Structures are given as C-alpha cells and as structure tokens.
Amino acid sequence: MELRFRNLIFKIAQGDITRFRSEAIVNAANKYLEHGGGVAYAIARAAAGNVREYIRISKEAMREQIGRDWIEHGEVVVTPALRLEQYGIKYVIHTVGPYCGGRWDEDKKEKLKKAILGALRKADELKVRSIAFPAISAGIYGCPLEEVVRTFLETVEKFSGEADNVREVYLVLYSSEDYERALKVLEVEG
Ligand code: AR6
C-alpha cells in the first residue's frame, strides 16, 4: 500500500526494520540513547552485535553532533549502520518520540511530528533516497497506533514540499496485526 505526495512515495510495510532495505533506518530512541528495549535494543544488537557497544557509539555521536548528553523532540543523532550495511543501510538516525502512556492530545502529536520531521530532514541532508521508520512511540511509550500512523501521513505530506533527495519513506510495522491496523488508517485517510 502506497501513497504519493508530490515527488515522494510513502509506503507501509511489514517486517523487521533491522533487515529493511533502505539507505537510512530510524530508531525510536529515548532522550539518552540508552537503547534498553523495543526496536532500539533490536537495532543496537543487530548493528554492533553488542548493545552496550552501540550505546557507547550513540552517546559519543550525540556529544559530537548535539553537544549534550540528551536530545529533545526534533533533535536527531546519526550513527553508522555497521553490520546493517549488508542490507544496504548506511545510517541509523535516532529520534525521540513522546511518551503517551495510553493518552493522546495535541501536545503529543506536535512532539511526534517534530521527531519524524527531524529524521526526514536529516536524511535529506545526508542525501539519502530511502528511509524506513518504525512506529515511533507506539510500543513502550504507549501512544495509540492509529494516531501515530495519521501523524506520519501528515508529516510526510508536509515534508514532501521541501524534500530534495528523499524519494521513498517507509513505515515498517513489526507485527501483522499492527500492519493491518496501519493499512486501515491509510485506506480511510489516503
Ligand atoms: N522492527 C520494526 N518495528 C519494531 C521492531 C523491529 N525489529 N521491534 C519493535 N518494533 P518501541 P517507543 C515496533 O517500544 O514506543 C526503548 O526502550 C514495536 O512493535 O520500540 O518509541 C527506547 O530505548 C512498536 O510498534 O518504541 C525507549 O526507551 C514500535 O516498534 C522506548 O523504548 C515502537 O516501539 C521508546 O518507546
């Protein structure tokens, strides 16, 4: 299932993002890049073979790129893909979405938009053609999946007006249930 916004294609896919063939993948991180669970842990383990080592690499990159030991919503950190290069992945872009704990409001939506847009802009700056996102904040952070998917749609549409290099944006759902739910949102909104 795909939608076209200007020169940009937005696709929903199902699978494991650590093996997804795109030039950049996004990590749904926490602000300290601790990669303790969820997709963050999976990416860290797959990239470095050792989660602690990828946390070290991420924190060092954060200090160099941001000059702080944490990131705000909208700020992103780039780390090398290491072992993920075998799938054609060049970069991992770490971004932080809102914590919802089951609640959703305009403030969470704005924070999620910033997190998505920050990663898209960084990918464009890195001259990446394709970028894959997990459903940021829809796991441990407890934001409603349907709202997360809607926010992706709106943000990618907005970004399509400024994209120079990015041509394909994927939202990769891990479980088939989440994939089916995301497809329904696209069918209704798209
Ligand atoms: N490929 C694609 N999607 C995945 C994968 C995978 N390998 N593994 C999980 N997901 P979460 P959050 C999905 O919890 O809600 C971490 O501890 C998952 O099913 O990873 O933003 C961080 O360090 C869900 O739909 O991220 C933060 O502390 C989506 O990825 C915190 O979790 C996001 O779930 C961030 O929580």
Image: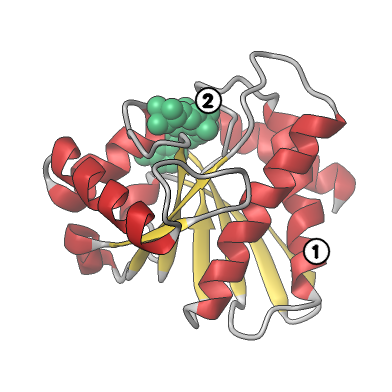
Q: Quadrant of residue 108?
A: top right
The reply, left or right, for residue 49 in relation to residue 77 is: left
Label 1 neighbourhood size at 10 Å, few (<14), some (14-19), many (20+)? some
Dot 2: what SS? loop
Q: Where does label 2 land, which residue? A: 139
Q: Nearer the viewer, residue 73 or 106?
A: 73
Considering only vertical position in the picture, is 124 above or below 133? below
Q: Is residue 69 left or right of residue 48?
A: right
Is 149 above or below relative to 121? Answer: above
| Image quarter hosting the C terminus | bottom right
Q: Say few, some or many: other residues with alpha carbon within 10 Å of mark 2 (under 14 / 14 to 19 / 20 or more).
A: some
Q: Position of residue 188 (x, y in %)?
A: 87, 43
Q: Position of residue 73 (x, y in %)?
A: 62, 44
Residue 70 placement (x, y as % from top left): 45, 41
Mark toward the start of the polypeptide (2 vs 1): 2
Say which mark, if any, is on residue 157.
1
Marks 2 and 1, how far apart in space? 24 Å
Does the numbered disc 2 mark a residue whose Cβ is under 8 Å from ligand 1?
A: yes
Marks 2/1 in contact by CB < 8 Å: the verdict is no
Provide the secondary structure element on which disc 1 rests. Answer: helix
Under mark 1, the amino acid is Glu
Residue drawn at x 17%, y 59% is 83
> What residue do we see at 64% from left, 35% from top?
180
Looking at the image, which is closer to me, 155 or 184? 155
- Count of number-bearing discs: 2
Q: Amino acid at mark 2?
A: Gly
Q: Can residue 149 be spotted in the picture?
A: no
